[in-house]
Amino acid sequence: MPSSDVPDDRLPDIPDDGVPQDLPDDIRPFRAGEQVRLEDPKGRHHLVTLEPGRTFHTHRGGVALDELIGKPEGVVVTSSGGVPYLALRPLWSDYVLAMPRGATIVYPKDAGQILIAADIFPGAHVIEAGAGSGSLTCALLRAVGPTGRVTSYERRDDFALIARRNVERFFGESPSTWHLVVGDVAEAPTEPRADRIVLDLLAPWDCLPWAAATLRPGGVLCCYVATTTQLGRLVETVRAHGGFTEPISSETLVRTWHIEGLSIRPDHRMVGHTGFLMTTRRLAPGVTAPRRRRRPAPGAYGEDYTGPRPDAPSLTSEPSPAPTSPAPRASTPAENESCGHEADPKLAGRRTDDAVRPEQTAPEND
Ligand SMILES: C[S@@+](CC[C@H](N)C(=O)[O-])C[C@H]1O[C@@H](n2cnc3c(N)ncnc32)[C@H](O)[C@@H]1O
Protein backbone atom coordinates (compact mmCIF):
# COMPACT_ATOMS: atom_id res chain seq x y z
CA MET A 1 0.00 0.00 0.00
CA PRO A 2 1.54 3.36 -0.92
CA SER A 3 2.30 5.42 2.14
CA SER A 4 -0.16 8.11 1.12
CA ASP A 5 -2.93 5.53 1.43
CA VAL A 6 -2.01 4.63 4.98
CA PRO A 7 -4.91 5.87 7.11
CA ASP A 8 -3.96 8.36 9.82
CA ASP A 9 -6.01 7.29 12.82
CA ARG A 10 -5.82 10.77 14.21
CA LEU A 11 -7.51 12.33 11.20
CA PRO A 12 -11.28 12.35 11.44
CA ASP A 13 -13.28 12.04 8.25
CA ILE A 14 -13.48 15.43 6.63
CA PRO A 15 -16.99 16.33 5.60
CA ASP A 16 -17.27 17.50 1.99
CA ASP A 17 -18.86 20.77 2.93
CA GLY A 18 -17.87 21.31 6.51
CA VAL A 19 -15.00 22.07 8.87
CA PRO A 20 -13.97 19.15 11.05
CA GLN A 21 -14.35 20.11 14.69
CA ASP A 22 -12.12 17.59 16.37
CA LEU A 23 -8.70 17.79 14.67
CA PRO A 24 -5.71 17.02 16.94
CA ASP A 25 -3.85 20.11 18.17
CA ASP A 26 -0.78 19.51 15.99
CA ILE A 27 -2.83 19.44 12.80
CA ARG A 28 -3.50 23.07 12.07
CA PRO A 29 -6.33 23.30 9.55
CA PHE A 30 -6.19 25.97 6.85
CA ARG A 31 -7.83 29.17 8.00
CA ALA A 32 -9.45 31.97 6.03
CA GLY A 33 -6.97 34.72 5.18
CA GLU A 34 -3.82 32.62 5.13
CA GLN A 35 -1.83 31.66 2.07
CA VAL A 36 -1.81 28.22 0.58
CA ARG A 37 0.46 26.69 -2.05
CA LEU A 38 -1.42 24.79 -4.74
CA GLU A 39 0.70 22.40 -6.79
CA ASP A 40 -0.60 21.12 -10.11
CA PRO A 41 0.29 17.75 -11.67
CA LYS A 42 3.19 19.35 -13.58
CA GLY A 43 4.75 20.54 -10.32
CA ARG A 44 3.85 24.20 -10.85
CA HIS A 45 3.12 26.18 -7.74
CA HIS A 46 0.48 28.84 -7.21
CA LEU A 47 0.29 30.90 -4.04
CA VAL A 48 -3.26 31.91 -3.24
CA THR A 49 -4.93 33.55 -0.27
CA LEU A 50 -7.87 31.69 1.20
CA GLU A 51 -10.69 34.21 0.91
CA PRO A 52 -14.11 32.75 1.73
CA GLY A 53 -16.34 32.53 -1.33
CA ARG A 54 -13.47 33.12 -3.75
CA THR A 55 -12.52 30.91 -6.70
CA PHE A 56 -8.94 30.50 -7.87
CA HIS A 57 -9.11 30.44 -11.66
CA THR A 58 -6.77 28.36 -13.78
CA HIS A 59 -6.90 27.61 -17.48
CA ARG A 60 -8.23 24.19 -16.47
CA GLY A 61 -11.19 25.43 -14.44
CA GLY A 62 -11.67 27.02 -11.04
CA VAL A 63 -10.83 25.84 -7.54
CA ALA A 64 -13.35 26.90 -4.89
CA LEU A 65 -11.13 28.04 -2.01
CA ASP A 66 -13.91 27.36 0.51
CA GLU A 67 -13.14 23.70 -0.08
CA LEU A 68 -9.78 24.17 1.63
CA ILE A 69 -10.78 26.23 4.65
CA GLY A 70 -10.81 23.93 7.67
CA LYS A 71 -8.95 21.12 5.93
CA PRO A 72 -5.50 19.97 7.05
CA GLU A 73 -2.36 20.52 4.96
CA GLY A 74 -1.64 17.92 2.35
CA VAL A 75 -5.18 17.53 0.99
CA VAL A 76 -6.00 17.48 -2.71
CA VAL A 77 -8.67 19.71 -4.27
CA THR A 78 -9.92 19.27 -7.80
CA SER A 79 -10.67 22.14 -10.15
CA SER A 80 -13.93 22.30 -12.07
CA GLY A 81 -11.88 21.13 -15.09
CA GLY A 82 -10.87 17.95 -13.25
CA VAL A 83 -7.26 18.91 -12.42
CA PRO A 84 -6.09 17.87 -8.94
CA TYR A 85 -4.14 20.39 -6.87
CA LEU A 86 -2.11 19.47 -3.81
CA ALA A 87 -2.56 22.04 -1.03
CA LEU A 88 0.24 22.83 1.44
CA ARG A 89 1.28 25.87 3.44
CA PRO A 90 4.06 27.76 1.63
CA LEU A 91 7.60 27.28 2.88
CA TRP A 92 9.80 30.34 3.40
CA SER A 93 11.28 29.75 -0.07
CA ASP A 94 7.83 29.56 -1.71
CA TYR A 95 6.82 32.73 0.04
CA VAL A 96 9.84 34.89 -0.82
CA LEU A 97 9.95 33.80 -4.45
CA ALA A 98 6.32 34.82 -4.93
CA MET A 99 6.04 37.91 -2.72
CA PRO A 100 5.93 41.43 -4.17
CA ARG A 101 9.39 42.93 -4.64
CA GLY A 102 10.97 46.30 -4.87
CA ALA A 103 14.60 45.27 -4.67
CA THR A 104 15.94 41.91 -5.77
CA ILE A 105 15.73 39.39 -2.98
CA VAL A 106 18.33 37.11 -1.48
CA TYR A 107 17.53 33.75 -3.06
CA PRO A 108 17.01 30.62 -0.99
CA LYS A 109 20.34 29.02 -1.87
CA ASP A 110 22.18 32.12 -0.65
CA ALA A 111 19.99 32.76 2.37
CA GLY A 112 20.71 29.25 3.66
CA GLN A 113 24.42 29.83 3.23
CA ILE A 114 24.26 33.26 4.89
CA LEU A 115 22.62 31.82 8.00
CA ILE A 116 25.51 29.39 8.45
CA ALA A 117 28.40 31.54 7.17
CA ALA A 118 27.31 34.43 9.38
CA ASP A 119 26.60 31.98 12.20
CA ILE A 120 23.16 33.38 13.00
CA PHE A 121 22.10 31.79 16.29
CA PRO A 122 19.03 31.89 18.53
CA GLY A 123 19.24 34.97 20.74
CA ALA A 124 21.67 36.83 18.47
CA HIS A 125 21.47 40.57 17.88
CA VAL A 126 21.74 40.94 14.11
CA ILE A 127 21.88 44.16 12.10
CA GLU A 128 21.15 43.88 8.39
CA ALA A 129 21.04 46.33 5.48
CA GLY A 130 19.38 46.90 3.13
CA ALA A 131 16.11 45.32 4.00
CA GLY A 132 15.13 45.51 0.31
CA SER A 133 12.06 43.32 -0.07
CA GLY A 134 12.45 41.60 3.29
CA SER A 135 13.38 38.14 2.07
CA LEU A 136 16.54 37.78 4.15
CA THR A 137 14.86 39.61 7.02
CA CYS A 138 12.29 36.81 7.35
CA ALA A 139 15.05 34.17 7.42
CA LEU A 140 17.09 36.12 9.98
CA LEU A 141 14.09 36.66 12.24
CA ARG A 142 13.30 32.98 12.25
CA ALA A 143 16.92 32.07 12.98
CA VAL A 144 17.37 34.45 15.95
CA GLY A 145 14.09 33.22 17.44
CA PRO A 146 12.03 34.83 20.19
CA THR A 147 15.06 35.82 22.30
CA GLY A 148 17.02 37.44 19.48
CA ARG A 149 16.80 40.79 17.75
CA VAL A 150 17.03 41.88 14.12
CA THR A 151 17.49 45.54 13.24
CA SER A 152 17.04 46.19 9.52
CA TYR A 153 18.15 49.39 7.78
CA GLU A 154 16.72 50.41 4.43
CA ARG A 155 17.40 53.83 3.02
CA ARG A 156 14.53 53.86 0.49
CA ASP A 157 11.21 54.38 2.17
CA ASP A 158 9.30 52.74 -0.70
CA PHE A 159 11.38 49.57 -0.32
CA ALA A 160 11.08 49.72 3.46
CA LEU A 161 7.30 49.69 3.07
CA ILE A 162 7.47 46.62 0.84
CA ALA A 163 9.78 44.90 3.31
CA ARG A 164 7.45 45.73 6.20
CA ARG A 165 4.41 44.37 4.36
CA ASN A 166 6.22 41.19 3.33
CA VAL A 167 7.61 40.50 6.80
CA GLU A 168 4.30 41.20 8.53
CA ARG A 169 2.45 38.99 6.13
CA PHE A 170 4.98 36.18 6.53
CA PHE A 171 4.73 36.21 10.33
CA GLY A 172 1.05 37.22 10.45
CA GLU A 173 2.05 40.26 12.56
CA SER A 174 4.98 42.60 13.07
CA PRO A 175 7.50 40.50 15.00
CA SER A 176 8.36 42.04 18.38
CA THR A 177 11.99 41.04 17.73
CA TRP A 178 12.21 43.23 14.62
CA HIS A 179 13.11 46.88 14.28
CA LEU A 180 13.00 48.45 10.81
CA VAL A 181 14.78 51.77 10.35
CA VAL A 182 14.54 53.91 7.22
CA GLY A 183 18.00 55.36 6.76
CA ASP A 184 21.59 54.80 5.72
CA VAL A 185 23.19 52.03 7.74
CA ALA A 186 26.60 53.71 7.47
CA GLU A 187 25.17 56.49 9.67
CA ALA A 188 23.46 54.19 12.15
CA PRO A 189 24.31 54.31 15.87
CA THR A 190 27.26 52.13 16.78
CA GLU A 191 25.68 51.12 20.09
CA PRO A 192 24.42 48.70 21.18
CA ARG A 193 26.99 46.37 19.72
CA ALA A 194 25.83 43.66 17.33
CA ASP A 195 26.74 39.97 17.32
CA ARG A 196 26.35 39.76 13.56
CA ILE A 197 26.09 42.20 10.66
CA VAL A 198 24.73 41.18 7.27
CA LEU A 199 25.06 43.63 4.39
CA ASP A 200 23.27 43.16 1.08
CA LEU A 201 23.84 46.49 -0.64
CA LEU A 202 25.80 47.96 -3.47
CA ALA A 203 28.78 49.46 -1.63
CA PRO A 204 29.44 47.53 1.58
CA TRP A 205 33.01 48.90 1.72
CA ASP A 206 31.52 52.30 2.54
CA CYS A 207 30.00 50.73 5.67
CA LEU A 208 33.20 49.16 7.02
CA PRO A 209 34.10 51.92 9.54
CA TRP A 210 30.57 51.72 10.91
CA ALA A 211 30.64 47.90 10.95
CA ALA A 212 33.99 47.90 12.77
CA ALA A 213 32.60 50.25 15.41
CA THR A 214 29.35 48.32 15.78
CA LEU A 215 30.40 44.67 15.72
CA ARG A 216 31.49 43.15 18.99
CA PRO A 217 34.96 41.54 19.01
CA GLY A 218 34.62 38.11 17.42
CA GLY A 219 31.38 39.13 15.74
CA VAL A 220 30.80 38.13 12.12
CA LEU A 221 30.36 40.49 9.19
CA CYS A 222 28.78 38.84 6.15
CA CYS A 223 28.38 40.73 2.87
CA TYR A 224 26.49 39.64 -0.21
CA VAL A 225 27.56 41.27 -3.48
CA ALA A 226 26.57 40.61 -7.07
CA THR A 227 29.77 41.16 -9.05
CA THR A 228 33.44 40.25 -8.96
CA THR A 229 34.45 43.91 -9.02
CA GLN A 230 32.42 44.53 -5.87
CA LEU A 231 33.87 41.43 -4.27
CA GLY A 232 37.46 42.40 -5.03
CA ARG A 233 37.04 45.92 -3.76
CA LEU A 234 35.29 44.71 -0.63
CA VAL A 235 37.93 42.12 0.24
CA GLU A 236 40.80 44.52 -0.32
CA THR A 237 39.10 47.22 1.74
CA VAL A 238 38.56 44.78 4.59
CA ARG A 239 42.24 43.83 4.46
CA ALA A 240 43.33 47.45 4.29
CA HIS A 241 41.16 48.26 7.31
CA GLY A 242 43.12 45.79 9.39
CA GLY A 243 40.55 45.31 12.13
CA PHE A 244 39.06 42.15 10.68
CA THR A 245 40.21 38.59 10.05
CA GLU A 246 41.25 37.50 6.57
CA PRO A 247 38.01 37.50 4.52
CA ILE A 248 36.54 34.28 3.17
CA SER A 249 34.80 34.53 -0.21
CA SER A 250 32.46 32.04 -1.83
CA GLU A 251 29.57 31.53 -4.15
CA THR A 252 26.91 28.89 -3.83
CA LEU A 253 25.71 26.74 -6.71
CA VAL A 254 22.75 24.45 -6.19
CA ARG A 255 21.90 21.98 -8.92
CA THR A 256 18.74 19.93 -8.65
CA TRP A 257 18.57 16.44 -10.11
CA HIS A 258 16.08 14.55 -12.22
CA ILE A 259 15.53 11.05 -10.85
CA GLU A 260 13.27 8.67 -12.71
CA GLY A 261 14.12 4.97 -13.01
CA LEU A 262 17.37 4.72 -14.92
CA SER A 263 17.28 8.36 -15.92
CA ILE A 264 19.29 9.98 -13.16
CA ARG A 265 20.97 13.20 -14.21
CA PRO A 266 21.30 16.85 -13.25
CA ASP A 267 18.33 19.01 -14.22
CA HIS A 268 18.97 21.00 -17.37
CA ARG A 269 18.04 24.30 -15.75
CA MET A 270 19.43 25.89 -12.62
CA VAL A 271 19.76 29.29 -11.04
CA GLY A 272 23.17 30.27 -12.36
CA HIS A 273 24.72 33.34 -10.85
CA THR A 274 23.17 35.30 -8.04
CA GLY A 275 26.01 36.69 -5.94
CA PHE A 276 29.09 36.19 -3.78
CA LEU A 277 29.42 35.98 -0.03
CA MET A 278 32.25 37.43 1.96
CA THR A 279 32.61 36.76 5.66
CA THR A 280 35.09 38.11 8.15
CA ARG A 281 35.29 38.54 11.95
CA ARG A 282 35.96 41.62 14.04
CA LEU A 283 39.17 41.71 15.99
CA ALA A 284 39.48 43.28 19.43
CA PRO A 285 39.70 47.09 19.36
CA GLY A 286 43.19 48.29 18.56
CA VAL A 287 44.34 44.91 17.32
CA THR A 288 45.53 44.59 13.74
CA ALA A 289 45.21 41.33 11.87
CA PRO A 290 48.50 39.41 11.70
CA ARG A 291 49.90 39.76 8.21
CA ARG A 292 49.29 36.77 5.99
CA ARG A 293 52.56 35.19 4.98
CA ARG A 294 51.89 34.27 1.44
CA ARG A 295 53.16 35.27 -1.92
CA PRO A 296 50.46 36.86 -4.09
CA ALA A 297 49.94 35.82 -7.69
CA PRO A 298 52.39 37.61 -10.01
CA GLY A 299 51.06 41.04 -10.85
CA ALA A 300 48.15 40.78 -8.39
CA TYR A 301 49.11 44.14 -6.95
CA GLY A 302 51.07 45.36 -9.97
CA GLU A 303 50.90 48.81 -11.49
CA ASP A 304 47.51 48.14 -13.09
CA TYR A 305 45.96 47.48 -9.72
CA THR A 306 44.31 50.65 -8.42
CA GLY A 307 42.23 49.36 -5.55
CA PRO A 308 42.82 49.54 -1.83
CA ARG A 309 45.92 47.68 -0.72
CA PRO A 310 47.07 46.51 2.64
CA ASP A 311 49.98 48.58 3.87
CA ALA A 312 52.24 45.55 3.78
CA PRO A 313 55.19 45.39 1.40
CA SER A 314 55.43 41.61 1.70
CA LEU A 315 52.03 41.30 0.08
CA THR A 316 53.35 42.62 -3.18
CA SER A 317 55.16 40.24 -5.45
CA GLU A 318 57.15 42.95 -7.14
CA PRO A 319 58.44 46.33 -6.10
CA SER A 320 55.65 48.81 -6.50
CA PRO A 321 55.35 52.45 -5.68
CA ALA A 322 53.99 53.54 -2.35
CA PRO A 323 50.26 52.96 -2.15
CA THR A 324 48.64 55.42 -4.46
CA SER A 325 45.05 54.53 -3.99
CA PRO A 326 43.10 56.84 -1.79
CA ALA A 327 40.59 55.55 0.68
CA PRO A 328 37.80 53.78 -1.16
CA ARG A 329 35.66 56.27 -3.00
CA ALA A 330 32.19 56.70 -1.56
CA SER A 331 29.54 55.62 -4.01
CA THR A 332 27.06 58.19 -5.16
CA PRO A 333 23.39 57.63 -4.47
CA ALA A 334 22.79 57.44 -8.20
CA GLU A 335 25.27 54.60 -8.49
CA ASN A 336 23.64 52.78 -5.65
CA GLU A 337 20.15 53.05 -7.03
CA SER A 338 21.31 51.82 -10.42
CA CYS A 339 22.64 48.57 -9.03
CA GLY A 340 21.09 45.79 -11.08
CA HIS A 341 21.09 43.51 -8.09
CA GLU A 342 19.02 45.94 -6.12
CA ALA A 343 16.30 46.83 -8.56
CA ASP A 344 13.88 44.19 -9.67
CA PRO A 345 11.69 46.06 -12.14
CA LYS A 346 10.42 42.88 -13.77
CA LEU A 347 8.70 41.86 -10.60
CA ALA A 348 7.97 45.17 -8.96
CA GLY A 349 4.39 45.48 -7.90
CA ARG A 350 3.58 41.93 -8.82
CA ARG A 351 0.70 40.56 -6.87
CA THR A 352 1.44 37.73 -4.54
CA ASP A 353 -1.98 36.24 -4.92
CA ASP A 354 -2.31 33.89 -7.79
CA ALA A 355 1.27 34.58 -8.78
CA VAL A 356 2.23 31.66 -10.97
CA ARG A 357 5.84 30.61 -10.83
CA PRO A 358 6.39 28.72 -14.06
CA GLU A 359 9.41 26.83 -12.81
CA GLN A 360 10.83 25.82 -9.49
CA THR A 361 13.94 27.70 -10.41
CA ALA A 362 13.84 31.35 -9.51
CA PRO A 363 14.37 34.13 -11.99
CA GLU A 364 17.98 35.16 -12.13
CA ASN A 365 19.19 38.32 -10.53
CA ASP A 366 19.68 41.08 -12.99
C1 LIG B 1 19.57 43.91 -3.04
S1 LIG B 1 18.59 44.88 -2.02
C2 LIG B 1 18.43 43.97 -0.53
C3 LIG B 1 17.50 42.80 -0.65
C4 LIG B 1 17.16 42.16 0.66
N1 LIG B 1 18.35 41.64 1.31
C5 LIG B 1 16.14 41.06 0.47
O1 LIG B 1 16.49 39.89 0.70
O2 LIG B 1 15.00 41.34 0.11
C6 LIG B 1 19.66 46.18 -1.55
C7 LIG B 1 18.94 47.26 -0.74
O3 LIG B 1 19.91 47.99 -0.02
C8 LIG B 1 19.44 49.31 0.08
N2 LIG B 1 20.64 50.09 0.44
C9 LIG B 1 21.71 50.37 -0.35
N3 LIG B 1 22.64 51.05 0.35
C10 LIG B 1 22.14 51.20 1.61
C11 LIG B 1 22.64 51.81 2.79
N4 LIG B 1 23.84 52.39 2.83
N5 LIG B 1 21.89 51.77 3.92
C12 LIG B 1 20.65 51.18 3.90
N6 LIG B 1 20.13 50.59 2.80
C13 LIG B 1 20.86 50.59 1.67
C14 LIG B 1 18.83 49.59 -1.27
O4 LIG B 1 17.92 50.65 -1.22
C15 LIG B 1 18.17 48.25 -1.58
O5 LIG B 1 16.83 48.24 -1.17
Image: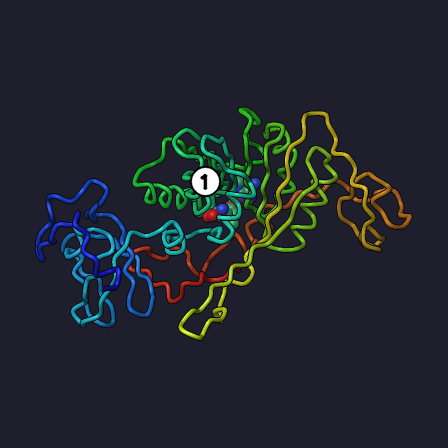
For the residue labelled by badge 1, is the local secondary structure a helix, a strand or a loop?
helix
| Identity of the residue drawn at 22% across and 45% down | 27
Q: How many numbered marks appear?
A: 1
Q: Estimate the x, y position of residue 143 in percent, counting from the top left.
A: 44, 39
Picture quadrant of residue 38: bottom left
Structure colour scheme: rainbow
Of residues 251 and 199, the one drawn nearer to the viewer in this rendering = 251
Q: Estimate the x, y position of residue 144 in percent, counting from the top left.
A: 44, 35
Picture quadrant of residue 86: bottom left
Q: Estimate the x, y position of residue 291 in percent, counting from the top left.
A: 79, 37
For mark 1, what is the residue? 140
| Identity of the residue drawn at 47% across and 56% down | 344
Of residues 114 and 13, the one drawn nearer to the viewer in this rendering = 13
- Specify the farthest residue to the right: 319
| Identity of the residue drawn at 49% across and 40% down | 154
- Specify the farthest residue to the front: 1
- Specify the farthest residue to the bottom: 262
Q: In the image, 91: left or right of 136?
A: left
Quick check: 47 above or below 179?
below
| Identity of the residue drawn at 50% across and 37% down | 120
Q: In the image, 190: left or right of 163?
A: right
Disc 1 residue type (three-letter):
Leu
Quick check: 8 above or below 280?
below
Q: Estimate the x, y position of residue 74 in percent, counting from the top left.
A: 25, 56
Label 1 environment density (alpha carbons within 10 Å; few <14, some 14–19, many ≥20):
many
Q: Report the quarter where the N terminus lies.
A: bottom left
Asked if the residue at label 1 sits under 8 Å from ligand 1, the reply is: no
Q: In the image, 229: left or right of 129?
A: right
